[in-house]
Amino acid sequence: MSAETSTETIDPKLLEELVCPVTHHPLRFDREAGELISEAAGLAYPIRDGIPIMLPDEARALKA
């Protein structure tokens, strides 16, 4: 993970609208990791260059 990734931000209004594509539950923004977290699916979606990558194949599984 680069230092640039850890400073990613996301518009709070956008975050209110985004949901997990797998479970359709809300997401939590992890600023330090630069990811959107789906607790329900156990997945972390990356944010690259300020754009959330909402593809399940691009998400990493959260540790149990």
Image (cartoon, rainbow, N blue to C red):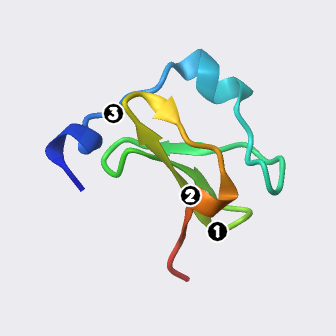
Q: Which residue is mark 1?
A: 42
Q: Quadrant of the C terminus?
A: bottom right
Q: Which residue is mark 3?
A: 8
Q: Residue furthest bottom?
A: 64
Work out how far the residue at label 3 is from the one at label 1, CA to CA, in angstroms: 21 Å
Residue 43 appears at what percent x and percent y? 61, 63
Residue 16 left/right relative to 32? right
Q: Please, what secondary structure does the residue beneath circle 1 have?
A: loop
Mark before the other along the chain sequence, 3 or 2: 3
Residue 2 appears at what percent x and percent y? 19, 49
Q: Is residue 58 above or below residue 19?
A: below
Instruction: Name the residue rendered at 68%, 26% in the picture.
Output: 16
Work out how far the residue at label 1 is from the one at label 2, CA to CA, in angstroms: 13 Å
Crowding around mark 3 (Cα neighbors within 10 Å: few <14, some 14 to 19, many 20+) is many
Mark before the other along the chain sequence, 3 or 1: 3
The reply to whether discs 1 and 2 touch (Cβ–Cβ < 8 Å) is no
Instruction: Name the residue rendered at 56%, 42% in the picture.
Output: 53
Instruction: Name the residue rendered at 49%, 30% in the picture.
Output: 51
Q: Quadrant of the N terminus?
A: bottom left
Residue 13 appears at what percent x and percent y? 61, 16
Query: Which residue type carries mark 2?
Result: Glu
Query: Which residue type carries mark 1?
Result: Gly
Q: Please, what secondary structure does the residue beneath circle 2 have?
A: helix
In this rendering, the count of numbered labels is: 3
Q: Nearer the viewer, mark 3 or mark 2?
A: 2
Mark before the other along the chain sequence, 1 or 2: 1
Residue 60 left/right relative to 7? right
Q: Which residue is mark 2?
A: 58
Q: Nearer the viewer, mark 1 or mark 2?
A: 2
Crowding around mark 2 (Cα neighbors within 10 Å: few <14, some 14 to 19, many 20+) is few
Crowding around mark 1 (Cα neighbors within 10 Å: few <14, some 14 to 19, many 20+) is few
Query: Which residue type carries mark 3?
Result: Glu
